[in-house]
Image (tube, helix red, strand yellow):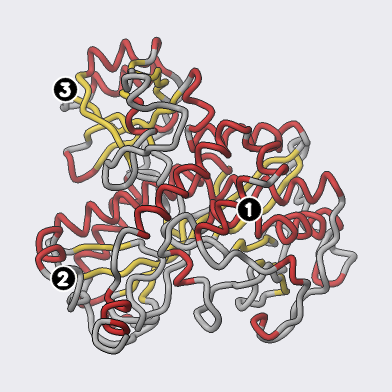
Amino acid sequence: MTVAPISDARDAEARVRAGANEHVKIGVFDIDGLLRGKFMHRDKFAHALNHGFGFCDVVLGWDLDDQLYDNTAMTGWDTGWPDALVRVLPETGRQIPFEDGRWLFLAEFTGDAEAVCPRGVLRRVLARADGMGYRVNAAFEYEFFVFVETPHSVRDKNYRDLKPVAPGSTGYSLLRTGALGDFYNDILDTCSGMDIPLESMHEEMGPGVIEAAISVTDGLAAADRAALFKTMIKILAQRRGLMATFMAKWSSQQAGQSGHIHLSLTRKTDGVSVFHDPDTEDGISAAVRHFIGGQQKLMPEMTALAAPTVNSYSRLVPGQWAPTEASWGIDNRTCALRVIPGRADSQRVEYRLPGSDANPYLALAAAIASGLHGIEQEISPTPPVTGNASEAELPRELSLPRTLADAATAFSHSAIARDWFGDTFVDHFAATRDWEVRSFAKHVTDWELARYFEMI
């Protein structure tokens, strides 16, 4: 059953008090896209709706493993890890079907912490788009692998010899979706009940891999849907004794996992597509050419937002269905930017750089900001690539960074990133990626042991 969206704080409080649960869930998404939050009694929730509440800012100062950064200025031991003010977002409220309809609300950091809040970063980018007269429409699609494992078993196995939920490579197989029907129905029903409508879902290439496309909506809501989708998939899998991973590349034998973003612009005044021009070849307007031009030119500087982990760069290699240069083409899936021609209401650009590991708010912010910069500066793209983009000859400056360290450096030095996202965010995010690189450098990989242990 479709539930009407919550209109304001008063409506949110009324819905919560009318429900069977005394406690709601409140969550904020951190720099890596993890949902951090707590249970809150509905009486305190009513107060928080109008006045906000304090949330320990440590969630802005630690990594995926709750290890404290040693190089960020936003918070730390020197500040005493104080509370930061958080505002509850009534319009994000949705009920969790498998928790007896418990309400979940998203929140954003305010005050000084707002500068590094991922949702706040995207909201500010969208505000600039609004000022330019545009409405941003976006949709995410994700690939994820599912295993017959638990959080304990994967650790006991040291992440080796994991058992996929289905064997072999059975892309688009209706056999698998039928045999795993209960899990698929969990996903479909939960997403439908939580305003994360799926346009499609199917088996992808590889053992136990699924791809889902989330329906299009406005930019901020699209990122909310994407971030919640990843969270709910992992929860649903574990509730069935399974595990889902959104790593960019979990196995050297399997293809990487993408988190592609579909984008279009419409005019605020009349809702007409900015990307479509029926009088040009493939319907490509001048505005979308400049949008592509900006995305193409700035992609090397923005890579860290779309590929934020050390593991991301194992996906960004030739022959892996992922780009290594900022290429573009018409309906060409070998390119970093795929222009999908069609009707005015369907023509769009697919931003194919992000892996499934990217924070949706930040990857979308990068895709939008770079495109709008292209429109502002009337940047022309290179000629479109036909055929295999990995064999195309593109200018050297369009090559993407090959490591997270290089990507973080390029992002830190980007004047455009600082203009669109602010110095505080750029410095903070670049520092967190430097921490990620240094954390990885302390470890010895299986590849190093196999190659050097005996022979070197």
Which amino acid type corresponds to the residue marked 2 in the rendered image? Val
Residue nearest the observer in this picture, 395 or 444 = 444
Q: Which residue lies furthest to the front in this view?
A: 456
Residue 392, percent across and down? 72, 82
Badge 2: residue crowd in 10 Å (few <14, some 14–19, many ≥20): some
**Circle nearer the viewer, 1 or 2:** 1
Reading the image, the residue beneath label 1 is 410
- First in sequence, mark 1 or 2: give its number: 2
Answer whether labels 1 and 2 touch (C-beta < 8 Å): no
Residue 48 versus residue 305: which sits nearer the camera?
305
Q: Which residue lies furthest to the right in this view?
A: 279
Find residue 22 and name its label.
3
Q: Which residue is drawn at 72% across and 46% down?
A: 266
Judging by the rendered image, the residue that carries numbered circle 2 is: 148
Query: On the picture, is 44 further left or further right than 417?
Result: left
Of circles 3 and 1, which is in front? 1
Image quarter where the N terminus lies is top left
The x and y percentages for residue 343 are 72, 63
Q: Is residue 76 above or below residue 159?
A: above
Query: Which secondary structure, mark 3?
Result: loop
Q: Which residue is drawn at 53% across and 62% down?
A: 260
> Callout 3, which amino acid?
Glu
Residue 394 is left or right of residue 405, and the answer is right
Image coordinates for residue 455, horizontal then vertical, percent:
29, 89
What's the residue at 43%, 41% (across, down)?
Answer: 31
Viewer-proximal residue among 349 and 95: 349
